[in-house]
Amino acid sequence: MKFRAARTDQPSLALRAEHPWQSSDQNGSTIELLPSERTELLLLGELLTVKAHSAPIFMQGERAKHLYYLDEGVVQGRHTIRNGVRQSVALFWPGDFFGLPRDGCFFNSAEAVTNCTAYKFPIKDLEKYLPRRPRIQQKLLLKASHDIRLAQRRLIVMGALDVTRRLAVFLVDCCGHAQHFDDENQVLTVPISRHDIADHIGTSAETVTRAMKTLEKKGLVRRITPWQLELRMSELFAFSGLD
Amino acid sequence: MKFRAARTDQPSLALRAEHPWQSSDQNGSTIELLPSERTELLLLGELLTVKAHSAPIFMQGERAKHLYYLDEGVVQGRHTIRNGVRQSVALFWPGDFFGLPRDGCFFNSAEAVTNCTAYKFPIKDLEKYLPRRPRIQQKLLLKASHDIRLAQRRLIVMGALDVTRRLAVFLVDCCGHAQHFDDENQVLTVPISRHDIADHIGTSAETVTRAMKTLEKKGLVRRITPWQLELRMSELFAFSGLD
DNA sequence: CGCTCCCTTGAATATTCTCAACTTTGGTGG
DNA sequence: CCACCAAAGTTGAGAATATTCAAGGGAGCG
């Protein structure tokens, strides 16, 4: 597995995705829009800034008129079921799209976890525009393929791993994002609360704490503050049992 | 929720997907290729017939040169992790694509659960062809969006529901496929073994049996044979707690 | 008839959840 | 700078859920 931030400080509209059909050993395995494609696409969108933990960007069930693209920050996609249990459907990082609807309505809500900047694109416009720009559309198709794989990977994690291993995978995944991981000192700044981690890996906040302690006892994580963790990435990943 | 088979006996290359941005109340909410698009695309592919429970169609880790399209039958996408635990990543039904790689290699293996016919498309050819057929590419993008949503829905199921409810959702989902569900008598022919169900909903075969008995005691399912289940679909779905 | 493969059941064990109390953290205002 | 508060994190104990291992049925097939 490669640890790489797809985007650090480049201009907008990079896609967080690896090319499924090219090995990451060769260069050019991430999917990039050309500068011209970028500026063109941006004309369709509307800039949006959202403060951390403010009102949701959109709510589950709302009519979906826009597709969202995250430029900076972290957004959590949530779904609430009837008994009130919440499940984090995905964490969105810079370079991700979110806001896929079903039957014209958002299937989950989106909340800014940190301060964010995003673009929203009217779906009607996208539908008209994309077929006329097949190379851009192709890159979006690759990005979508990438996201399917990511979701499937998360399914594996949820279905086959115990809570401690799920937490290990979550922490390793966070390290792929330069904004939150100091590569020098191997220190991760956890972007979300224990409760949100719990929603993300399908458990309770208390169990997250206990799992964290288990990782600490194994020497895979050292807790500086609850939010600052020094961690042994490769051992942590090996422990999870994935490849 | 709508219960509908996207494909029963039409010719090949229908996409199992609902249009994300159109309500299913209006007609035309499923994504269809035009007849001309269909024949055109089929020229790129190679027909494939696979017997139930025969050797895998492809194996996790193998070099991925083709993308697969399932025309008839049921295929299970599986991922095996180091400790030997298997997780079913997805069940593929007629109208689904499978075989998404990472780094050029299959991320999971695919096994025919029933007798199947499928097409395989060389990825190189698709990459060259699709940008020249933007309307087809757009439909594939819609299909991919649909599949992302399905995977996210399954994440919700895995993360927020107990085994009995996960089984309920699985059974209801199977009813969406006319080949296996007799709408008249409300009888489902379960397509996969208890063990495979277990892999699919992230538990053990024994627990599947027990969960089945729980559903039976609640009167939501009546077991005719282990494979023939008469079920109360809407109550079953209501019980699961999803919308 | 007997074999195999699956499904089912039981009992002991392990994991995780829930609820309640306690502690730390990070901000706010004196 | 310190005292205080609210929010978040941590810990413990008992209950609920799921796993594992072992053994007992049942259907299909040679």
Image: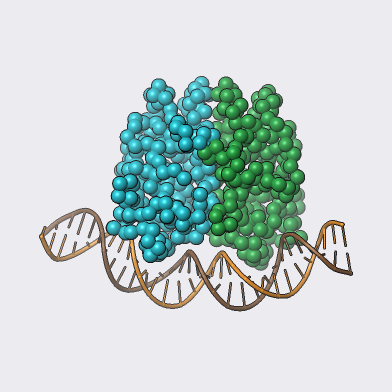
Chain colours: A cyan, B green, C brown, D orange
Q: Residue furthest front?
A: A25
Residue in view at x 67 percent, y 34 percent: B120
Q: Is residue B84 above or below residue A8?
A: below
Residue in view at x 57 percent, y 24 percent: B128
Q: Is residue B42 above or below residue A166?
A: above
**Whole-percent x and y of residue A142?**
51, 33
* Residue B24 placement: quadrant: top right
Is residue A54 visible in the rendered image? The answer is no
Q: Is residue B17 left or right of residue D29?
A: left
**Whole-percent x and y of residue A192?**
36, 51
Q: Is residue A197 above or below residue B71?
A: below
Is residue A69 visible in the rendered image? The answer is yes
* Residue A160 placement: quadrant: bottom right
Numbered marks: total:
0
Q: Is residue B150 above or below residue C10?
A: above
Residue in view at x 64 percent, y 62 percent: B205
Q: Is residue A4 left or right of residue B13?
A: left
**Whole-percent x and y of residue B35?**
69, 25
**Whole-percent x and y of residue A115?**
31, 43
Depth check, front residue: B144 or D4:
B144
Residue in view at x 73 percent, y 60 percent: B226
Depth check, front residue: B207 or A31:
A31
